[in-house]
Image (spheres, grey):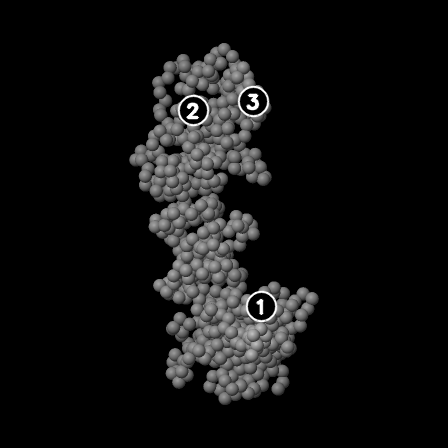
Amino acid sequence: MGKKQFKAESKKLLDLMINSIYTQKEIFLRELISNSSDAVDKIYYKALTDKSLNFDKDNYYIKITPDKKNRTLTISDTGIGMTKEELEENLGIIARSGSLAFKKENELKDGFDIIGQFGVGFYSAFMVADCVTVISKALGSEEGYKWESEGADGYTIEPYQKETPGTDIILKIKENTEDEHYDEFLEEYTLRSIIKKYSDFIRYPIKMLVTNQKLKEGSEDEYEDYTEYEVINSMVPIWKKNKNELTTEDYEKFYSEKHFGFSKPLKSIHVSVDGAVSFNSILYIPSKTPYDFYTKEYEKGLELYSSGVLIMNKCADLLPDYFSFVQGLVDSEDLSLNISREMLQHDRQLKLIAKKIKDKIKSELLLMIKNERDKYEEFYKNFGRQLKYGIYSDFGANREDLQDLLMFYSSKQNKMITLDEYVNSMAKDQKYIYYACGESNEKISKLPQTELVSEKGFEILYFTEDIDEFAIRMLMNYKDKEFKSVSSGDLGIEPEEQNIDNEEKEENKEIFKFMNESLSGKVKDVRASKRLKNHPVCLSSDGELSIEMEKILNDMPNNPNIKADKILELNINHEVFSALKDAFEHDKDKLKMYTNLLYNQALLIEGLSIEDPLEFTKDICKLMK
């Protein structure tokens, strides 16, 4: 029989496949197994309406037969088969797809979907094969046919004797080259790995011819090889099962099998959605932070399946960055098996799935706060930083998604609390949500700046991570309550200026002026403090940049040397201030020394470096003399 030519589009694709630059040549097996599963699905569907077919699922399967000697790999199925015309249409013209046509002609009402698209996927066989032979007999036909092609030159079709309906695809595997080792596609281990990776949840048994050993008859220590077909795939994916059928152990086992993490997950989330978009998903919140989580090497994303067939190992578009710690997978019948990464980025269904997954993760975390507080605090210890980065990034665009998930240590309750819990316990006359920054809770509790707020009985949130204040500044307010640092210039609770003797007020003004000039360039102003009660001195900030933010920014590798506008505040009721007044009257040099000492003392309290340690030690020695 004469050779027939492929259509122009098919020739272009074949050229691409034969001279493939794809690194993942292994996907050819995924495509061909999907087509086989598709063919069996069609018999299943026909059996629903044609009782004479007497469909018995045990009689339907997919077989994988490697033959190293002849360098062939055969993929067989007991599906619906193809007529001569269907072989022409499905394999000769890329634009046609037997599966798509079948879908359009028949309404599938039992939840089964047709996954393979006999067209683009089939041509991937030419990435690994010099010659592809398809032997098929359609259900109800008397005669079978053999389709054969060695690539872009065309194909032949001729009658072929085949006893039962179904299709055999025989690949003549290419010889090895310097760059490619095609032998691996004849190796049992490699084939098993590919099937488990991509096709583990195909709903029919995938049987592969394997070599095992058994004791020779009549021998106690001599073994001999024998071959048998072994089922490789799991068939029923856990996410397709009813939640009531599954136990915590089932979810943990699956987590371990998929290598999502080394320890047990903190939380598993099983999602089943029907509607504008339908999908099943199993999501996991890890109990430990992955070792590379806060590095550039960490790759976020969920495994993406189309009707049980893996189409992407890490689909980043399914998760926002702030939930990048979530592991798991999504399986949807609304996504095409052959969809590309570029198409996925613009896929409407994928965006709908991503939004529903984001909302589900958030709602589960909120439930954890309410019902499993210890578990949530464990999660927050590992991944709270990521949530704060989520608020800080994109100019606060994600604040609505994340603000209710934040937690900080409370000065009054001595435990982690949410912003909602803070606001609900606020005093009636309290205008602001107060916070303080520092290296640790213990150090923050000793800060002089906290005195006035604490005396008023107001709660203070402790910020101990470098991202905390940046995130809160982006948040700006919560439930109409503005955030206020205890180190800010105006706390909103300072006592009204008392009636101070005008002469003393003028005298203090001159002291502050002298001290300000002594610290020229180091502070913006020196003034009497309204917040200090027991401490003699502290620093506060004036403007948008806080002292804590200055520290963090200047610790970065590309030190921008940004400075906050610092105010040196003095407690005029402290005995130290009497020494300042005395020095102002009798010894201006001593006042200058006292000024430097107090400034350096304030820097140390803030955790800032002293600008001139040598001068500081000299001043202390002078004071001791």
Q: CA distance from mark 2 to mark 3?
A: 22 Å
Proximity of marks 2 and 3: CB atoms separated by less than 8 Å? no
Q: Looking at the rendered structure, which numbered label has been put on residue 190? A: 1
Residue at the far right in the pictured view:
178
| Residue 177: quarter of image | bottom right
Proximity of marks 3 and 1: CB atoms separated by less than 8 Å? no
Q: Nearer the viewer, residue 54 or 620?
A: 620
Look at mark 3 in the image and give the residue it sits on: 617
Count neighbours of disc 2 (C-alpha within 10 A) and say few if under 14, some if 14 to 19, many if 20 or more: some
Q: Give coordinates of residue 325: x percent, y percent.
A: 47, 52
* Dot 3 amino acid type: Thr
In the figure, 72 relative to 317: above or below? Answer: below
Residue at the (34%, 30%) spot, across then down: 456
Asked if one can make out residue 522 in the rendered structure from this viewpoint, the answer is yes
Q: Give coordinates of residue 527: x percent, y percent.
A: 45, 23
Q: Secondary structure at mark 2?
A: loop
Q: Secondary structure at mark 3?
A: helix
Q: Secondary structure at mark 1?
A: helix
| Residue 407: quarter of image | top left
* Dot 2 amino acid type: His
In the figure, 2 relative to 467: above or below? Answer: below
Q: Pick the quarter of the image with the N terminus.
A: bottom right
Q: Looking at the rendered structure, which numbered label has been put on residue 13? A: none
Q: Give coordinates of residue 142: x percent, y percent.
A: 50, 88
2 or 1: mark nearer the eye: 1
Q: Looking at the rendered structure, which numbered label has been put on residue 535? A: 2
Q: Give coordinates of residue 311: x percent, y percent.
A: 51, 65
Q: Pick the quarter of the image with the C terminus.
A: top right
Residue at the (41%, 16%) spot, across then down: 505
Label 2 or label 3, whichever comes before in sequence order: 2
Q: Nearer the viewer, residue 521 or 147?
A: 147
Q: CA distance from mark 3 to mark 1?
A: 71 Å
